[in-house]
Amino acid sequence: YKKITTKSLIDMKAQGEKISMLTAYDFTMAKIVDSAGIDVILVGDSASNVMAGHETTLPITLDQMIYHASSVVRGADRALVVVDLPFGSYQSDPREALRSAIRIMKESGGHAVKLEGGKEIKDSIKKILNAGIPVMGHLGLTPQSIYKFGTYTVRAKEEQEALKLIEDAKLLEKLGCFSLVLEKIPAKLAQQIAESISIPVIGIGAGSGVDGQVLVIHDMLGMNNEFSPRFLRRYMNLYEGMTSAISQYVEDVKSKDFPNKKEQY
Ligand code: KIV
Ligand code: NA
């Protein structure tokens, strides 16, 4: 795949090739992630947490998401860029949802949008799809509803919620979503859903039986020592690496080691 499209992802699922997805929120990170061969870059509203320092994803605005997304688009060459519609930009009514999605597509150059929820937002998803904008769904632990859930623990452990999840996943497929994210649900349920629909299911904390995986880049690079959920694999300890580089720099400035003769004009 020279350039990843929504169609490529559907083909990957049909051929049994797993899909790799990571978040990015700025140009430099997007460039690195894209060069390393990622299939999908998600401009997640997790920017609210990792970029802005908020407790939840709720405060980030549509304008802020567009700023992050436009930076990412400039850094991405091969990857498909999917942009989260933030809390408050699509829940009121389908026309508002479409307006928000159009703003993201026009002002950032992103390739698709992601919305949290199933049946409740089906008219909004339809309206966005009708305008030719690809939609990725997001079910399970949907962080924009954290105050409804009250906790970030695993969702759909009980049958009633699991049944609704299966129904919602089938609905998203039927509406025409090109893919969907399942967050923090039992692996068995996630696999069952992935096997029962033809669009690719990307998991986070949803086990290995799905069609792809997504992680927040700051988490997988180990930039955050405090956040350690079971599903997270750390590929680096950037927190330690950066801290020691920075304290070395401080020491070198204080000791007048930096800059040396070769590092000046
Ligand atoms: O905002 C985000 O980073 C996400 C992923 C965790 C799926 O929605
Ligand atoms: Na998100």
Image: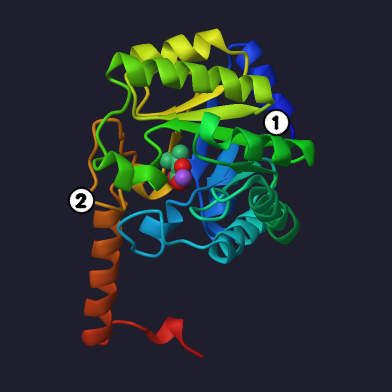
Locate residue 28 relative to residue 11 in the image: left or right.
left
In front of the other: 226 or 56? 56
User: Residue pushed farthest bottom?
Assistant: 265
| Quarter, ligand 1 | top left
Give the residue at x 44% y 9%. Answer: 192
Give the residue at x 50% y 14%. Answer: 194
Report x, y in % for residue 117. Answer: 49, 35
At label 1, counting other C-alpha atoms closer than 10 Å, the crowd grade (few under 14, some 14-19, many 20 or more) is many
Asked whether mark 2 and ligand 1 are closer than 8 Å, the reply comes as no
What residue is pinned by disc 2? 226
Above or below 49: residue 22: above
Report x, y in % for residue 7. Answer: 73, 26
What residue is pinned by disc 1? 6
Locate residue 83 relative to residue 164 in the image: left or right.
right
Q: In terms of image quadrants, where is residue 107?
A: bottom right
Total marks drawn? 2
